[in-house]
């Protein structure tokens, strides 16, 4: 804070909220971070909130150079180039084609279409990779690595105000492996009958039975699980993404949405068309593209096999070792005068 | 207390200054000693990192290596947040590379293959370069600090200083540095707590810059990447072209040096052929088998060659090469109703009979030898029929004789196709010769194709920059290009209007023609240099002759005489058959060169035509044929149409001129080597060299071949004429004429595409690039300018009011 002999505007004769108080805002200003149920509704809501803010509030704050801007906002804004970049990439290709001659347009449209499909596949493949790891992990251990929580940010008020804004952010409890939000899993205060209830549950589910300090035993394991999961998700997501874009580059996709004469249109038709084209694209990629070149065949097979293999290996490898008992015993080594665990 | 400090020191101490290597270890007595003697706080290792531009690639490699190592830690569950974040970058690059690699394998041309990687590289480069050029550098210049400043923390982790606005490690800056930044920002030097104020300003600028980066990157990165690829592509093309030329040339020179080298033999055995032969050895084979053989042996799809080969294979298989006459004849059995038991001549009997008659058993079967065999064997029948008294059994004897001879005939004439071991070897040798010829021919074809091929990356095609130059010389605006590329008709209309305009203004006409002639000269020159026309043609011709003749010799050795005749021509007649492969490949080179040049000459011819149309020369010439106004108008209209919308070879088809006289006037004036005065003046200048003569010769040649009534009207077109061009009543209607005389391919090549198509195609190429550039360079430039300009509006903070001047309020 700048202080002493210099004074910042506005004059600090007004002691108040930075923004008009409403009952909701008042309630929010006293709210604490808490876990949300990890269901689809909550996760979708959290995602939409984040993307919505990333396109509206955060850029405004960022452009103003707001002192309350934070790292979360910066990361959230990372979605902007991701989405705009995808659209631009397709536009760079497709928009210019309008001025091309009919033949060039046809050729360019084909490539453009595949490019568009490629971008969509890329996004889907990356999401799929997360699910491939997270779903088996939750089913097996009971730990939802994408566990959302609601965070209340009590912003610093500008000079002259007593209270700043309170804003909501949606985070994931395990998004930081260095600082997982363990506190959210251990209720405090009068309601807390058993602070370790959640850890007890996890320990029991994973065959550790009743532990004296389940949190002590489980925390390092969960942390390790989160790191492994994140690593595998990264490996898997880019392998799947590369495969998906490669798949979208196959010739059958040129037919997508092309009206083939007297066949009935409609939703059912779109689905069957899509399934048929997907099938043929897999085949084409496996066999080495439309021209069946050897190199394309080898690489195509490699990408497809790598994706399939990694999709199986990733969740297994993530879970490996989670339930193993540590062999180290707690002992007192008098000569060293300290404990090693 | 000491215990705690020791533990802290161990966990924080970076081992060997390496990143991410701080690990728990058991303390040694030295650790305790250190703290007991004089405990001090552990030294902070964090520092700012400055990376000069030239070191960026090195740092990128180092960072990537570090990231790869981190994956290992991640798989063991040991990574921290920072490492996991870095892993994402690595994944993006590895995934991108894998994809580029995959897509490259799907591309046909090596340049296209390269561009997949280049596209990938330029995308990532522009991702890194855009913020550097448009955000970081301008900010550094205006505000005095790098908003993308990196630092390494005490644990060796590299991070951005301004990544998290809530945690900015300003203590890594020396106070003097902050002061200097403040000076650059123009912050009041006397301000109290100046450093705090400067830091606040820095934070604000950094937050704003980061936001601008996020908002612009999505648009800027793909566009910048695409523009970059566009530029780089040209350089890469050139380099690849040079490499390819070198490779192809070296292959060819090896071929010239030693055509029999092992290099030009098929490297791997044709397993399918080998199996087929092996499975059928000593078996009777049929036509289907021969077809299979042809398919396996001849990998080209030339029908004529296939027919020749099939004939050869049939000859090989039916010959008794290696099998004895007695084997071919086998046992001969004669049955007749009056005979109680059939008469049987065993193989041995036949063999003995032949050897007694001094007939070589291994003799080749042909009509002559068949006769002598029949004569000799007849003695056997004679001996047999002696048993029957002649008067009573005349009929029977005649019948037996006949049956016997026809049996011999049948067995010798249609010997069964049996694949003997000898034949198998012959076929395998034949295949060897064929595959080797194929390899050699492919090398030659590749060489020719690389130089003058009709593909976009042949040397000649690359030298063909003329089209763009001609369009520019003829003043095609962006709007004209957009119109012209719609259809050849549209292109023709624009062209017509332009030519009329040029012809009216002599100065302009000369200027346009001057530019066009310059282009033709430079094209000729570059083709001569790049393709090396004269020497190149001779080279190809010699090698083609040699390869084909060598193969013919080999093929005849392997009993492939039909194929040899087809490929190299029957040497007993002339050197080459008219349709032989050798002749065609030599002509193809000629025609390609002529075709390319012809397209350019056509522009000159067109300009000249409009000029003569403008000054009335043409009208006068046509009037000389017939004064009738309709006739004159019709002829001139046809000429203009033919010039713009016609290729020379479809004059007969498209320009259905009923009157031979009109046709003559039409052709003679359209292809008039007497060029207009202005044209002669421009083309005849010194720097144009022999261009005038060359064009005149070209026009004369085309006129002679196309306009020659003999050729045209004797082909059985809709109208027939005698040699003098006089109309003959009894025309054979309905037949359209195509050139059928010798060398007609050459004529077709000379004709090339229509003028309108040429303009349309050129407009398309230029228009597409321009349209693309116009749109995206504009958007890109817009984003760039806004981003740059924004720099000047960043970091505005109201400076605190100086004490004593206005109201004074102590704050806290």
Image (cartoon, coloured by chain):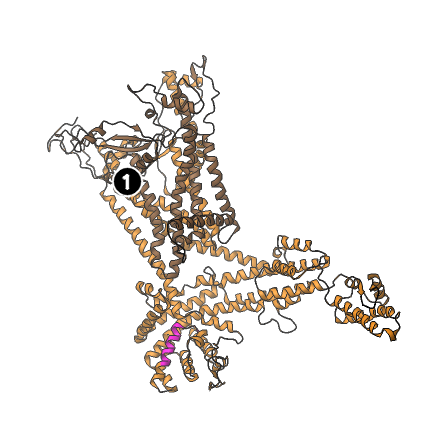
Chain colours: A brown, B orange
Q: Position of residue A55 (x, y in %)?
A: 27, 41
Q: Quadrant of the N terminus of chain B?
A: top left
Quadrant including the C terminus of chain B: top left
The image quadrant of residue B542 is: bottom right
Magenta region, main secondary structure: helix
Residue B378, image x and y in percent? 83, 70
For residue B643: magenta? yes
What residue is rendered at 40% in x and 34% in y?
Answer: B84
Residue assigned mark 1: A52
> Could you tell me if residue B277 is visible in this image?
yes
Q: Left of B21 or right of it: where is B787?
A: left
Residue B785 in the image, given as x and y percentages of width and height: 27, 49
Magenta-span inclusion, residue A121:
no
Question: For this view, does B260 lie left or right of residue A6?
Answer: right
Query: Is B768 on the left or on the right of B797, as rendered?
Result: right
Nearer to us in this view, B342 or B496: B342
Q: Position of residue B561 (x, y in %)?
A: 66, 67
Q: Which residues are magenta?
A: B634-647
């Amino acid at each position: 804070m700048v202080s002493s002999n210099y004074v910042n505007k506005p004059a600090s004769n007004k002691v108040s909220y930075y923004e008009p108080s409403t009952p909701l805002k008042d309630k929010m200003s006293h709210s604490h971070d808490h876990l949300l149920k990890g269901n689809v509704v909550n996760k979708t809501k959290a995602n939409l909130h984040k993307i919505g803010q990333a396109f509206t509030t955060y850029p405004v704050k960022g452009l103003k150079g707001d002192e309350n801007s934070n790292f979360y906002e910066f990361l959230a804004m990372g979605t902007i180039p991701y989405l705009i970049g995808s659209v631009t990439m397709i536009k760079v290709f497709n928009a210019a084609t309008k001025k091309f001659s009919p033949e060039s347009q046809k050729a360019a449209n084909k490539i453009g279409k595949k490019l568009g499909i490629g971008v969509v596949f890329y996004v889907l493949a990356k999401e799929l990779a997360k699910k491939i790891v997270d779903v088996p992990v939750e089913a097996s251990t009971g730990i939802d690595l994408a566990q959302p929580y609601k965070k209340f940010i009590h912003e610093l008020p500008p000079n002259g105000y007593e209270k700043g804004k309170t804003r909501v952010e949606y985070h994931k409890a395990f998004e930081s492996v260095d600082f997982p939000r363990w506190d959210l899993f251990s209720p405090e205060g009068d309601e807390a009958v058993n602070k370790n209830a959640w850890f007890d549950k996890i320990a029991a589910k994973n065959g550790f039975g009743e532990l004296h300090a389940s949190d002590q035993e489980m925390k390092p394991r969960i942390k390790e699980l989160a790191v492994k999961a994140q690593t595998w998700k990264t490996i898997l997501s880019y392998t799947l993404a590369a495969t998906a874009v490669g798949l979208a580059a196959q010739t059958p996709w040129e037919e997508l949405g092309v009206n083939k004469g007297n066949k009935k249109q409609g939703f059912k038709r779109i689905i069957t068309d899509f399934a048929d084209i997907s099938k043929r694209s897999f085949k084409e990629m496996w066999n080495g593209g439309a021209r069946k070149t050897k190199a394309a065949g080898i690489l195509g097979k490699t990408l497809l096999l790598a994706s399939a293999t990694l999709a199986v290996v990733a969740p297994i490898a993530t879970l490996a070792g989670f339930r193993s008992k540590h062999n180290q015993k707690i002992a007192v080594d008098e000569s060293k005068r300290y404990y090693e665990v | 207390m000491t215990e705690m400090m020791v533990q802290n020191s161990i966990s924080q101490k970076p081992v060997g200054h390496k990143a991410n290597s701080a690990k728990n270890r058991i303390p040694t007595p030295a650790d305790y000693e250190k703290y007991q003697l004089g405990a001090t706080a552990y030294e902070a290792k964090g520092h700012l990192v400055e990376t000069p531009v030239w070191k960026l690639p090195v740092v990128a490699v180092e960072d990537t290596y570090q990231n790869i190592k981190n994956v290992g830690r991640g798989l063991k569950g040991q990574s921290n947040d920072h490492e996991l974040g870095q892993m994402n970058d690595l994944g993006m690059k590895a995934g991108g590379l894998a994809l580029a690699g995959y897509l490259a394998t799907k591309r046909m041309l090596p340049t296209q293959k390269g561009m997949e990687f280049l596209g990938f590289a330029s995308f990532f480069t522009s991702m890194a370069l855009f913020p550097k050029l448009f955000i970081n550098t301008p900010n550094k210049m205006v505000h005095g600090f790098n908003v993308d400043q990196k630092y390494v923390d005490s644990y060796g982790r590299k991070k951005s200083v301004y990544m998290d606005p809530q945690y900015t490690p300003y203590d890594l800056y020396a106070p003097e540095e902050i002061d200097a930044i403040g000076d650059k920002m123009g912050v009041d030097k006397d301000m109290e707590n100046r450093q705090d104020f400067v830091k606040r300003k820095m934070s604000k600028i950094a937050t704003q810059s980061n936001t601008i980066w996020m908002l612009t990157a999505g648009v800027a990165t793909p566009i910048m990447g695409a523009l970059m690829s566009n530029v780089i592509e040209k350089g890469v093309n050139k380099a690849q072209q040079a490499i390819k030329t070198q490779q192809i040339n070296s292959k060819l020179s090896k071929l010239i040096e030693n055509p029999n080298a092992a290099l030009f033999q098929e490297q791997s055995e044709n397993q399918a052929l080998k199996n087929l032969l092996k499975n059928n050895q000593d078996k009777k084979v049929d036509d289907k088998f021969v077809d299979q053989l042809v398919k396996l042996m001849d990998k080209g799809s030339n029908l004529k060659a296939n027919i020749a080969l099939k004939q050869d294979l049939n000859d090989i298989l039916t010959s008794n090469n290696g099998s004895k006459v007695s084997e071919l004849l086998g046992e001969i059995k004669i049955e007749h109703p009056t005979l109680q038991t059939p008469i049987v001549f065993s193989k041995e009997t036949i063999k003995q009979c032949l050897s007694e008659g001094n007939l070589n058993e291994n003799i080749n079967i042909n009509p002559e030898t068949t006769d002598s065999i029949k004569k000799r064997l007849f003695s056997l029948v004679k001996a047999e029929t002696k048993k029957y008294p002649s008067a009573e059994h005349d009929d029977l004897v005649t019948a037996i004789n006949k049956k016997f001879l026809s049996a011999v005939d049948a067995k010798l004439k249609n010997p069964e196709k049996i694949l003997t071991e000898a034949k198998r070897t012959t076929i395998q040798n034949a295949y060897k010769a064929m595959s080797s010829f194929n390899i050699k021919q492919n090398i030659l074809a590749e060489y020719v194709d690389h130089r003058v091929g009709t593909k976009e990356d042949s040397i000649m095609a690359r030298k063909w920059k003329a089209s763009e130059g001609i369009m520019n010389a003829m003043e095609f605006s962006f709007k004209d290009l957009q119109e012209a590329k719609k259809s050849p008709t549209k292109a023709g209309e624009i062209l017509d209007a332009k030519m009329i305009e040029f012809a009216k203004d002599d100065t302009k006409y000369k200027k346009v023609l001057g530019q066009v002639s310059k282009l033709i000269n430079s094209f000729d020159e570059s083709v001569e240099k790049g393709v090396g026309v004269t020497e190149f043609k001779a080279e190809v011709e010699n090698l083609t002759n040699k390869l084909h003749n060598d193969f013919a010799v080999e093929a005849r050795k392997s009993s492939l005489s039909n194929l040899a005749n087809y490929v190299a021509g029957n040497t007993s007649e002339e050197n080459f058959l008219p349709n032989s492969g050798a002749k065609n490949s030599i002509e193809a080179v000629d025609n390609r060169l002529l075709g390319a040049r012809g397209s350019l000459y056509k522009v000159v011819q067109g300009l000249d035509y409009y000029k003569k149309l403008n000054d009335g020369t043409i009208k006068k010439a046509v009037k000389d044929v017939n004064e009738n106004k309709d006739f004159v108008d019709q002829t001139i209209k046809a000429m203009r149409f033919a010039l713009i919308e016609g290729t020379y070879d479809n004059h007969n088809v498209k320009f259905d001129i009923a009157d031979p006289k009109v046709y003559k006037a039409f052709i003679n004036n359209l292809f008039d080597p007497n060029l207009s005065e202005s044209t002669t003046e421009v083309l005849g200048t010194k720097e144009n060299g022999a261009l005038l003569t060359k064009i005149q010769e070209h026009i004369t040649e085309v006129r002679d071949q196309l306009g020659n009534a003999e050729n045209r009207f004797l082909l059985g077109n809709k109208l027939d004429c005698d040699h003098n061009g006089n109309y003959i009543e009894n025309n054979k209607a309905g037949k359209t004429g195509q050139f059928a005389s010798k060398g007609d391919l050459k004529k077709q090549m000379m004709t090339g595409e229509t003028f309108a198509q040429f303009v349309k195609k050129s407009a398309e190429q230029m228009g597409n690039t321009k349209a693309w550039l116009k749109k995206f360079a504009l958007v890109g430039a817009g984003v760039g300018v806004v981003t740059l300009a924004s720099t000047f509006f960043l970091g505005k903070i109201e400076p605190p009011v100086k004490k004593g001047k206005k109201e004074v309020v102590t704050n806290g």
